[in-house]
Amino acid sequence: MFPNPAQIRMPRQQQGFLIPLALFILVVMGVLALTISRTSMQIQTSAIQEFMNVQAFYAAESGAQRGMKHLYFDQGPPTRATVDAQCFSLNTNYSFTSDGLKACTAQVSCTFTVDAANIRSFYTITSVGSCGADQYRAERTIQVGSFMEQE
């Protein structure tokens, strides 16, 4: 009536594989989600930085054009003496108010040299455009040159 202890089979100890598999999948999915999130943030930051770089370039370009206008067209007909004086006094900061360059400034300066024969004056306008703030700040420098001969 009582079973023989030698004939009693004990159930084998179960060896489950679903828990380690589930943990492995969770870890892999978590790492993948973190990687995608970081990549997305880096792409967004680089897009903003590229936009600021382009704006800074155009701010510097606009500053250089304003500098040339100041040099040659702000005082009657340009003579070499008046252009030399305009260049000597040119050291200006421009703050842009239009929508495209609203957060930008341009610092414009001018230097000039005269050739050995005192026939020509060579002008170099340097414009430094800067846009943005903190980590999204961009700065670009443009130099333009021109010359004027003695009448």
Image (spheres, grey):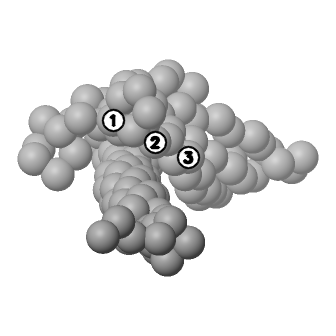
Type of residue at label 3? Thr
**How many neighbours does mark 1 have within 10 angstroms: few (below 14), some (14-19), or many (20 or more)?**
many
Please give the label number shown on residue 112. Answer: none
Q: Secondary structure at mark 3?
A: strand
Q: Where residue 87 sits in the image (x, y, percent)?
A: 53, 33
Q: Where residue 31 sits in the image (x, y, percent)?
A: 45, 58
86 vs 149, left or right, is left
Q: Residue at x 10, y 47 (%)?
A: 99
Where 94 sits versus 77, above or below?
Answer: above
Looking at the image, which is closer to me, 46 or 120? 46
Looking at the image, which is closer to me, 89 or 57? 57
Closer mark to the observer between disc 2 and disc 3:
2
Please give the label number shown on residue 141. Answer: 3
What residue is shown with label 2? Answer: 138
Residue placed furthest toward the left: 99
Type of residue at label 2? Ala
What residue is shown with label 1? Answer: 132
**How many neighbours does mark 2 have within 10 angstroms: few (below 14), some (14-19), or many (20 or more)?**
many
Type of residue at label 1? Gly
149 vs 87, left or right, is right
The tag earlier along the polypeptide, 1 or 3, is 1
Looking at the image, which is closer to me, 27 or 84? 27
Q: Residue at x 62, y 46 (%)?
A: 124
**Visible in this render: residue 15?**
no
Q: Quadrant of the N terminus?
A: bottom left
Q: Where residue 75 sits in the image (x, y, percent)?
A: 31, 37
Q: Quadrant of the C terminus?
A: bottom right
The tag earlier along the polypeptide, 1 or 2, is 1
Distance Cα–Cα, label 1 vs label 3: 15 Å
